[in-house]
């Protein structure tokens, strides 16, 4: 509501107006006359007077009012008024300047409203104006549903259409008004209904008497109208439905009662034009019917409440004001929640209910109303209905349509079959029955996993339905570890190539230890099965041809996408997952590789332990995998091992936290033989140490051989497996892992010591497949003397 013009504004604008100059009596002077001495008003209205500010004064003789003494100077030839005139201080030039600026702003607002299609015959400033909505044209009844409000100072203008199926609203400002003032003015989301509601917060409701409403029994015409809607005379009588004859128009009168006393009355014409008694308290229609009720049904209209009566449900009420066009962004405080004040006014009746069935209309406003009610009443005790079809194509819109088309028994079944109102994050198993059915029937084809491409691995960790060791399943997290230079990255690359060849999966790679060109070389060698260069490691094998190279580049581009930092900053796990999400949505990738963990940025709050951080991080990774049905391979290095005998490390040896094995779905250790007495040095032991889902695998070891020329892995032969198994068993007998590592008193995990950084070119060590002498000596020195 615009502020009331002050006395000095009235007087100064009157003095500067042309009407006052001509000696006429303007409306401004009429408004000021109530607050000025007669002599002062007469002096100004006599014409041609100017007001000059002299000084302000206050003192003990004037304890209440702070006034300004002004000298009214007459135009030449005019008589001077007898004495000074006192008004509140304001500079005349400032008032004129403000008025000119306001007029300019108002002109801009009017033009912008016209651009929106809002163009009434006459503009009203500082008050709400109802007109036809240019978007919905008032619906079939052509009602004046659009309310427009323009501030008197021209700072902004807003509008809102009150038809629930439209709900068009907007806000405009002049150019020179800062955008921040929109929020400060409180008009951004404020409609005229909300403004009026805030004014009504302190208003005393009007008490009405039934005899003053001049209501009368329903005529035959209205009786026939209800009969067509399957509402009986007994139901109308019990609910005291009457009529009112006003202006030669007969309207249905729905009386709102509390304890039998009329509180309000709502009128409805047959063509769905509504009105109601002004300034009355808002309550439910049929409030007395839910007194001390355990189950309550809430509908959207009075006729729907009568329809529930016909079906035998008297514990039903109707909202008084219909449905909103959409769900609000937040719930206001009780004092400001005027749209749903009837809920607060009827709180005593609602608190005793243990179950509230929301039977609102089956349209967007009706669903929005159900959500608004559930948010305020508590979703945990709310239920919702599912309206049946009235024919092969259309669904019943509300309770009355069910009664009319299907009968009272169908309406009873709708209420009896009401479902729990959904709560975000809380589900029933039946919500997932379609997914469970597809899993049972094998609709997607990857329910039992995808083969790894190695028979020895398919008995442990694979992606198919044969005898299973391990399988790759979408939506899971696999943690891969192993000591440096064991071939973890090479094995994962080979696995991805096998899966792509079988199923056509695409992948996104976040491999911080690999240069792009080196990573491309390794992948192309595995794909084409020829060396990339004519180099010593290729021996006598033929190098890939240019045509093969070009075809391989096309395969690389279609199969793999890269996540890489373009500067020297470390990537965070959130950054990686955000880009992986984009790759899922844009390219349809099915697998993500993060290699390795220690190349990520692990900044954490000072009050958070590393164990807590790792747990939180792995939870994010698992949620990403499950939500996007994407398998994630996460490479994590082990901590420094004490008294290491050359055997494969344990999953609990991963640097950082035991959560790596606790939270992953699958845990794999890649270990390379470094002991010539234990067999060939190119044997790679794949240790499956954890499989959460027994359907896709089991714990065990598989042995593969590595081809340095092509970078491919193949199943080891039986003698090699027998020798490697015996050597592995001997090492486990004397394993470091029983009592050889220290526990941290802070995190209760294996004590983390810095592992020496050994450049890992996977298994590319020497020409004959053995580690180079320099690397072997380095590892040997470190294992015997970790401090060196």
Image (cartoon, grey):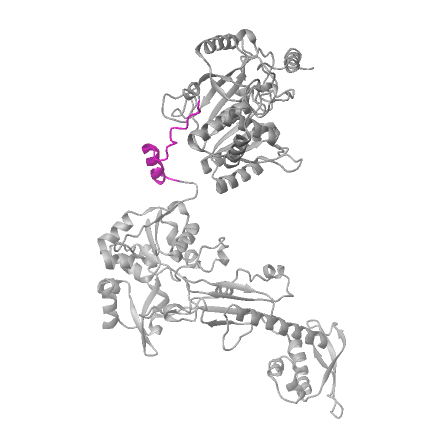
User: Which quarter of the figure is the N terminus placed in?
Assistant: bottom right
Residue at the right extreme, as displayed: 54
Disc tally is 0
* Residue beneath the point at 33% across and 49% down: 294
* Residue beneath the point at 51% across and 22% down: 712
Residue 450 covered by magenta stretch: yes
Q: Can residue 618 be seen in this snapshot?
A: no
Q: Is residue 215 left or right of residue 17?
A: left
User: Quadrant location of residue 150?
Assistant: bottom right
| Front position in the image: 757 or 225 | 757
* Residue beneath the point at 67% across and 76% down: 8
| Front position in the image: 147 or 758 | 758
Residue 190 covered by magenta stretch: no
Specify start and end residues of the magenta stretch as a single range.
427-453
User: Which quarter of the figure is the C terminus placed in?
Assistant: top right
Q: In this view, does 18 lie to the left or right of 127?
A: right
| Front position in the image: 472 or 60 | 472
Q: Is residue 690 above or below residue 421?
A: above
Q: Can residue 490 be seen in this snapshot?
A: yes
User: Quadrant location of residue 258?
Assistant: bottom left
């Amino acid at each position: 509501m615009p502020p009331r013009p002050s006395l000095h504004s009235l007087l100064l604008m009157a003095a500067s107006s042309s009407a006052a100059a001509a000696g006429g009596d303007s409306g401004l002077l009429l408004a000021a006359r109530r607050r000025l001495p007669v002599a002062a008003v007469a002096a100004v209205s006599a014409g041609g007077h100017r007001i000059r500010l002299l000084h302000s004064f206050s003192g003990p003789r004037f304890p209440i009012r702070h006034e300004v003494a002004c000298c009214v100077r007459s135009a030449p030839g005019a008589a001077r008024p007898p004495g000074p005139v006192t008004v509140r201080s304001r500079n005349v030039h400032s008032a004129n300047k403000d008025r000119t600026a306001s007029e300019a702003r108002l002109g801009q607002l009017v033009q912008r409203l016209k651009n929106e299609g809002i163009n009434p015959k006459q503009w009203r400033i500082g008050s709400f104006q109802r007109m036809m909505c240019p978007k919905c044209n008032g619906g079939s009844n052509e009602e004046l549903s659009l309310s427009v409000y323009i501030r008197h100072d021209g700072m902004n203008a807003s509008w809102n259409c009150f038809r629930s199926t439209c709900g068009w609203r907007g806000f405009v400002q002049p150019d020179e008004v800062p955008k921040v003032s929109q929020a400060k003015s409180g008009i951004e989301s404020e409609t005229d209904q909300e403004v009026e509601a805030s004014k009504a917060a302190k208003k005393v409701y009007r008490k009405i008497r039934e005899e003053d409403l001049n209501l009368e029994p329903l005529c035959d015409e209205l009786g026939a109208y209800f009969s067509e809607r399957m509402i009986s005379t007994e139901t109308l009588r019990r609910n005291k439905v009457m009529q009112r004859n006003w202006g030669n128009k007969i309207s249905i009168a729905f009386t709102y009662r509390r304890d039998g006393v009329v509180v309000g009355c709502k009128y409805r014409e047959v063509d769905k034009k509504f009105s109601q008694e002004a300034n009355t308290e808002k309550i439910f229609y049929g409030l007395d019917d839910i007194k001390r009720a355990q189950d309550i049904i809430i509908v959207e209209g009075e006729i729907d409440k009568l329809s529930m009566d016909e079906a035998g449900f008297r514990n039903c009420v109707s909202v008084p004001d219909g449905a909103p066009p959409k769900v609000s962004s937040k719930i206001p405080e009780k004092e400001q929640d005027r749209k749903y004040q009837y809920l607060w006014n009827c709180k005593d009746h609602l608190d005793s209910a243990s179950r509230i069935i929301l039977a609102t209309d089956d349209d967007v406003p009706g669903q929005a109303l159900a959500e608004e009610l559930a948010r305020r009443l508590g979703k945990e005790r709310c239920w919702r209905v599912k309206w049946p079809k009235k024919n092969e194509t259309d669904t019943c819109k509300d309770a009355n349509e069910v009664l009319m088309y299907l009968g009272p028994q169908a309406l009873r079944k709708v209420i009896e079959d009401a479902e729990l109102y959904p709560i975000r994050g809380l589900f029933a198993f039946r919500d997932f029955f379609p997914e469970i059915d597809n899993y049972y029937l094998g609709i997607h084809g990857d329910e039992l996993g995808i083969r790894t491409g190695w028979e020895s691995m398919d008995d442990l960790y694979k992606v198919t339905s044969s005898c299973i060791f391990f399988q790759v399943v979408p939506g899971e997290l696999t943690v891969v570890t192993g000591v440096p230079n064991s071939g973890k990255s090479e094995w994962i690359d080979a696995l991805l190539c096998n899966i792509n060849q079988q199923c056509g999966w695409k992948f996104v790679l976040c491999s911080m230890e690999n240069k792009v060109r080196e990573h491309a070389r390794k992948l192309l060698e595995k794909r084409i099965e020829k060396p990339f260069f004519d180099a010593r490691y290729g021996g006598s094998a033929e190098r890939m041809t240019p045509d093969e190279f070009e075809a391989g580049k096309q395969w690389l581009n279609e199969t793999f996408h890269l996540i890489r930092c373009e500067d020297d900053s470390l990537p965070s796990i959130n950054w990686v997952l955000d880009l992986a999400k984009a790759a899922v949505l844009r390219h349809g990738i099915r697998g993500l590789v993060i290699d390795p963990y220690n190349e990520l940025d692990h900044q954490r709050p000072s009050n958070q332990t590393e164990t807590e951080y790792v747990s939180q991080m792995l939870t994010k990774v698992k949620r990403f995998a499950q939500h996007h049905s994407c398998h994630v391979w996460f490479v994590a290095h082990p901590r420094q091992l004490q008294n290491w005998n050359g055997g494969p490390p344990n999953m609990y040896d991963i640097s950082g936290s035991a959560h790596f094995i606790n939270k992953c779905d699958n845990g794999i250790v890649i270990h390379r033989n470094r002991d010539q007495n234990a067999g060939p040095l190119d044997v790679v032991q794949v240790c499956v140490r954890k499989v959460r889902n027994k359907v896709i695998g089991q714990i065990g070891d598989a042995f593969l051989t590595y081809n340095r020329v092509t970078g491919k892995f193949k199943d080891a032969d039986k003698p090699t497996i027998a020798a490697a198994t015996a050597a592995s068993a001997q090492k486990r007998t004397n394993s470091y892992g029983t009592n050889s590592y220290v526990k941290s008193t802070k995190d209760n995990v294996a004590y983390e010591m810095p592992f020496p950084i050994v450049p890992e070119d996977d298994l590319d060590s020497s020409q004959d497949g053995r580690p180079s002498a320099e690397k072997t000596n380095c590892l040997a020195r470190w294992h015997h003397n970790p401090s060196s």
